[in-house]
Amino acid sequence: IDDAGKYVLPKLSYTGEEAERIAVVSATANNDFAAAVSDIILGKQPLDSFDDAVKKLKKAGYDDYIKIQQEAYNRYLAK
């Protein structure tokens, strides 16, 4: 725990378009994915349904979300 500060992510800056895309993807994908994982953990859905949850996450644009985060982090490193 003493070295926890070494692993804190920096504050990233986004373009207006990136911020909008992150907001849309986060609002839809994160809630749906969290609910799916919760249902699996609680036994309401079989473990096999996890792959479907990941597919839905990707369909909601989570790959774009990851790409935007990486681009913002690359800009941060370039400073």
Image (spheres, rainbow, N blue to C red):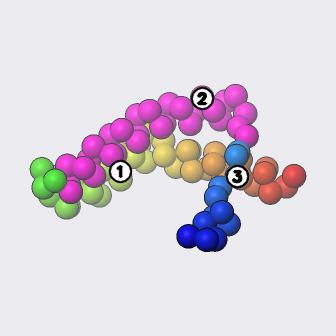
Q: Amino acid at mark 1?
A: Lys
Q: Quadrant of residue 40?
A: bottom left
- Any mark on residue 20, and which? 2
- Any mark on residue 65, and which? none
Residue in the image at 24% along x and 50% along y: 38
Pointer 3: residues within 10 angstroms few (<14), some, or many (20+)? few
Name the N-terminal-most of marks 1 and 2. Answer: 2
40 to 16, vertically: above or below = below
Q: Amino acid at mark 3?
A: Pro
The one nearer the camera, 56 or 1, is 1
In front: mark 2 or mark 3? 3
In front: mark 1 or mark 3? 3
Residue 23 x, y percent position in the rendering: 53, 32
User: Residues in magenta?
Assistant: 13-41
Q: Amino acid at mark 2?
A: Glu
Give the left or right position of residue 65, taking residue 52 as reference. right
Separation of marks 1 and 2 at Cα, in angstroms:
22 Å
Q: Which residue is mark 3?
A: 10
Q: Which residue is mark 1?
A: 55
The one nearer the camera, 12 or 54, is 12
Pointer 1: residues within 10 angstroms few (<14), some, or many (20+)? few
Give the left or right position of residue 39, taking residue 5 as reference. left
